[in-house]
Amino acid sequence: MVYLFQTDSNPVVLQKTIDHLKIALTNNKPIFGICMGNLLLGLASGAQTYKLKYGHRSHNQPVQMVGTNRCFITSQNHGYTVDIDLVAGDWEPLFVNNNDGTCEGIKHKVKPIFSAQFHPEATSGPTDTEFLFDDFLAMIKK
């Protein structure tokens, strides 16, 4: 069965997928969530999501990697975000939107698990965030 969701679909309706992710998080296997995958990973990790007033929709959204001065121009099309104030415990924000300070990605502090709300496979930068795929592949090879 195939489920199609619009970019403004509320991720909490995917409870079965969230439950599967909670089980997957108990393992030490690499996970890389993109867009809706970031939202679902946030919910599975215990955070919450909320609807943005206008959403992020363009090929020129600046995001900053937390703890660095690295800023990337990203492609985005989403209406929800992970509540950055509720990313806690073994989780921490990975990217923050420079326009409004919302969460653009999370990572586990110990396990090889991370996510991006933006689309690193898109070419808005043109390849600014391609390194995320290299990082994920390196995690798989370990």
Image: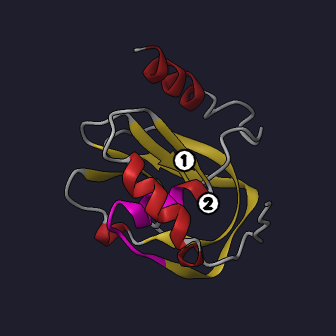
User: Disc 1 on helix, strand or loop?
Assistant: strand
- Kindly indicate whether the residue at mark 2 contacts the one at mark 1 (C-beta within 8 angstroms): yes
Residue 3 point in image, percent of width and height:
77, 65
Residue annotated with mark 2: 36
In-front residue for pair 37/29: 29
Above-or-below relation of 18 to 92: below
- Locate residue 19 relative to residue 74 in the image: left or right: left
Q: Residue furthest bottom?
A: 53
Residue annotated with mark 1: 33
Q: Residue furthest front?
A: 1
User: Disc 2 on helix, strand or loop?
Assistant: helix
The local crowd at label 1, few if under 14, some if 14 to 19, many if 20 or more residues have their Cα within 10 Å, is some
In-front residue for pair 28/49: 28
- Locate residue 51 relative to residue 30 in the image: left or right: right
- Locate residue 136 relative to residue 54 in the image: left or right: left
Residue 40 point in image, percent of width and height:
51, 62
40 is within the stretch colored magenta: yes
Which segment is the magenta one? 38-49
Residue drawn at 41 percent across, 46 percent down: 24
Which amino acid type is shown beneath numbered disc 2?
Answer: Met
Residue drawn at 77 percent across, 71 percent down: 6
Residue 30 visible from this viewpoint:
yes
Residue drawn at 52 percent across, 56 percent down: 38
Spatial separation of the CA atoms under disc 1 and disc 2: 7 Å
Residue 28 point in image, percent of width and height:
33, 34
51 is within the stretch colored magenta: no
